[in-house]
Amino acid sequence: MDDDDITQITEALRQTVEADPAAARKAITEFGWLELLDDQEQIAVSTLLPIWGRSLAQGSLLDPILVRAGGVADPTGLRVVLPALGSTRAPGRLVGDRVEIDGVLATGYGPILVLMATDGGLTLALCDDPGVVAGDPLDPSAGWARLTGSPAVLEKRTPTGIDPDVAWSAMLAAGRRALAYELIGVSEKMLEMTVEHVASRHQFGRALGSFQAVKHQLADVKLWTEVARLAADAAWEDGGEVSAALAKAAAVRASAAARRSCQQLLGGMGFTWEHDFHRYLRRALTLEPMLGGGPGLHRELGAALRSGAVSHDLIAL
């Protein structure tokens, strides 16, 4: 695809999602986004996920991204159990014919796919529907719930031609790239609504946005958002774990900068239910720790640096 094709796809997806963010999952399926994900993963993720974040569309797109990255056959309808927030450890442990789970799951219905630790290493397993219906109280519209319990293992789902450990590494990298783009969209929207606010509010006879201190804070948010975008785009070059971790770490840095600076500059408006900022704040706080938060990602990157797996030129955070 050339740049014009990508621009047209991006605009079409934007209109599709913004028409009804609450029903966006169904709309993009009818649009053919899952087929695009199969054929052009980078274009599918880099175009839609920022829009998803900007629009606060309901639900998550991680499930189809993860199952495809893991080479799992017949991925339609599967929900993937993610590690507990802030963790990257396997969320399941095989005990007899059941799997003890402590993780995070997209709300809905249907079978679940869980990475579980066994005596022989890691295995992906298909399990009964746990019947989770309660959403994350921090951001109900994001469609996440904590999952604990011991559902029965229906079958072990071996990735096609891939060792389960390698499959999980690929799934983790794909999920982090997707989360990075979604956080970028959230950060961009927080910045935009803050710029609009400081341009329309006046103090001492001047627009708030004309004060140097305000400009510096907004410039800092803009800088980190651009860094995150560059890191996310660069993560496709090798498709590896380190570059995906770097992209997610940069996106977390950008969203954290946006949360702090934008809420301060919005003043009392940023704390009201009438202003949309709190919705983006909730979404950012929900996404940041998924598949590893900032501190954990920095430890991973530091370990990769010490081991010589990557050069100092790659990691500049």
Image: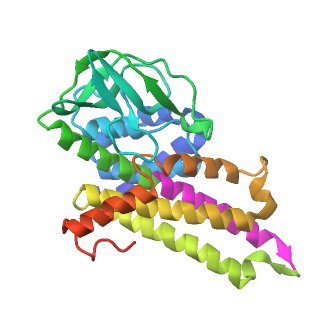
Q: Position of residue 208 (x, y in %)?
A: 78, 76
**Residue furthest bottom in the image:** 212
Q: Is residue 173 above or below residue 79?
A: below
- Residue lying furthest right in this view? 205
- Is 198 left or right of 80, judged from the image as shown? right
Q: Position of residue 235 (x, y in %)?
A: 30, 60
Q: Toward the viewer: 262 or 32?
A: 262
Relative to 39, residue 253 above or below: below
* Farthest left residue in view: 161
Residue drawn 18% across and 43% down? Answer: 166
Name the one closer to the observer, 43 or 131: 131
Residue 197 is covered by the magenta coloring: yes
Residue 133 position (above or below residue 219):
above
Residue occupying image coordinates x 88% and y 81%: 204
Q: Nearer the viewer, residue 46 or 235?
A: 235
Q: What secondary structure is the stretch in magenta mostly built from?
A: helix
Does residue 184 appear left or right of residue 261 in this picture? left
Report whether residue 232 is seen: no
Quadrant occupied by the C terminus:
bottom left
Q: Work out whether residue 264 can be spotted.
A: yes
Quadrant location, the N terminus: bottom left
Q: Give the residue at x 33% y 15%.
A: 152
User: In the rendered picture of this protein, how many numbered marks are placed on residues?
Assistant: 0
* Position of residue 153 in the picture relative to residue 225 (left or right): left
Q: Position of residue 315 (x, y in %)?
A: 32, 71
Q: Which residues are magenta?
A: 182-203
- Residue 71 horizontal/vertical position (percent): 21, 36
Render colour scheme: rainbow
Check the image and report above or below for 234 versus 170. Answer: below
In magenta stretch: residue 137: no
Residue at position x 44%, y 46% in the image: 290
